[in-house]
Image (cartoon, rainbow, N blue to C red):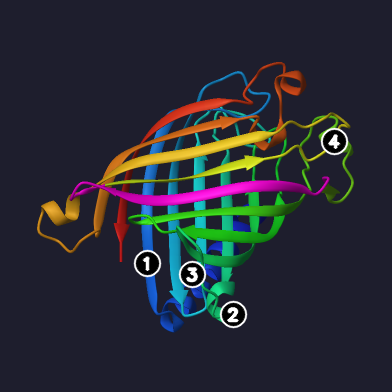
């Protein structure tokens, strides 16, 4: 097993242990595994449309004064996104997201006006590792800021977060090969939303959206751009239709629009791979 794969295995184990402990202490919890796939993913500086298969492990839980969310994506690219040191084998990536929200309204016994259901303080981290041929990302991003939960059928949360992002790439090509240690970007704001809204008896419209401001200069001294990442899906409760418990098995279609991926722009990539429009198929099993 390579060093990179060992790192991924350790992250996955920590994720499982954390999710298990959280589920036992929570008032409510939901843990699921999912698979999705598409053939129109993009990567900055890469002119090709890329096929990827993505396995996900997700846990959400809540207690009287807050909630938490963990998601681990394991992404396997096809040969059009080659692995280091290159060749026909596709790159492999792990991306971990953790968020914890403390419910300020309940702590302070506050009466919230109008359509607000909850007011909280969210903190968390994004971590990734990828073994591609060019960049070899090792992203780390801390986030902190207020979150509002809205009184709608299902779930709708919006948050205004500050992000402190850094990376320690060690790809073989300049200017990445010249980066020493961890490069830190300019702190920048992030507007985030996530939702799950019922559509009829057996359907749900779910997803998330991130609108991220420019994070200053990149490792090569080039200006980064504002980033938009919208991921939406329409899911059928197939389990309920087949007699299983509600939301045990979901299937549907997913669509992702990602503009200026990771802050890369037309100017920095030569209009190669920084914007993606990706339809996918998705299935989920909830425990």
Q: Is residue 167 visible?
A: no
Question: Height in image: 54 above or below 159?
Answer: above
Sequence-first disc among 1 and 2: 1
Q: For the residues labelled 4 and 2, say whether their Cβ atoms are less than 8 Å apart.
A: no
Image label count? 4
Residue located beneath label 3 in the image:
16
Residue located beneath label 1 in the image:
30
Q: Mainly helix, strand or loop, the magenta region?
A: strand
Question: Height in image: 172 above or below 8?
Answer: above
Front-lying residue, 60 or 152: 152
Indicate which label's residue lies in the foreground, 1 or 2: 2
Q: For the residues labelled 1 and 4, say whether their Cβ atoms are less than 8 Å apart.
A: no
Indicate which label's residue lies in the foreground, 4 or 3: 4
Q: Residue at 75% x, 37% y: name it.
A: 214
Q: Residue at 71% x, 25% y: name it.
A: 265
Sequence-first disc among 2 and 3: 3
Indicate which label's residue lies in the foreground, 1 or 3: 1
Indicate which label's residue lies in the foreground, 4 or 2: 2
Q: Position of residue 34 (x, y in %)?
A: 37, 51
Range shown magenta:
185-203
Residue located beneath label 4 in the image:
217
Indicate which label's residue lies in the foreground, 2 or 3: 2
Disc 1 packing (10 Å; few <14; some 14–19; many ≥20):
some
Sequence-first disc among 4 and 3: 3
Q: CA distance from mark 1 to mark 3?
A: 13 Å
Q: Secondary structure at mark 3?
A: helix
Residue located beneath label 2 in the image:
108
Front-lying residue, 75 or 265: 265
């Amino acid at each position: 097993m390579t060093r990179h794969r060992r790192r991924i295995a350790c992250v996955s184990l920590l994720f499982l242990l954390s999710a298990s402990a959280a589920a036992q202490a929570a008032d409510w919890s939901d843990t699921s595994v999912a698979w999705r796939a598409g053939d129109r993913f993009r990567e900055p500086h890469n002119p090709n449309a890329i096929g990827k298969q993505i396995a996900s492990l997700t846990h959400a839980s809540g207690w009287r004064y807050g909630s938490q969310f963990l998601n681990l994506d394991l992404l396997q690219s096809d040969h059009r996104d080659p692995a280091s040191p290159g060749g026909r084998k596709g790159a492999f990536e792990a991306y971990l997201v953790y968020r914890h929200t403390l419910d300020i309204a309940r702590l302070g016994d506050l009466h919230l006006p109008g359509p607000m259901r909850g007011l909280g303080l969210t903190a968390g981290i994004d971590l990734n590792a990828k073994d591609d041929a060019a960049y070899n990302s090792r992203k780390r991003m801390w986030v902190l800021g207020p979150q509002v939960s809205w009184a709608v059928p299902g779930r709708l949360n919006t948050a205004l977060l500050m992000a402190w992002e850094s990376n320690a790439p060690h790809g073989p090509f300049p200017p990445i090969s010249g980066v020493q240690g961890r490069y830190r970007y300019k702190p920048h704001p992030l507007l985030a939303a996530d939702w799950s809204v019922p559509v009829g008896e057996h359907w749900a419209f779910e997803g998330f959206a991130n609108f991220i401001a420019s994070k200053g200069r990149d490792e090569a001294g080039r200006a980064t751009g504002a980033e938009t990442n919208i991921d939406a899906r329409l899911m059928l409760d197939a389990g309920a239709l087949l007699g299983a418990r509600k939301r045990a098995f979901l299937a549907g279609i997913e669509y992702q629009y990602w503009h200026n991926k990771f802050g890369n722009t037309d100017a920095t990539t030569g209009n190669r791979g920084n914007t993606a429009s990706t339809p996918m198929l998705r299935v989920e099993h909830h425990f």
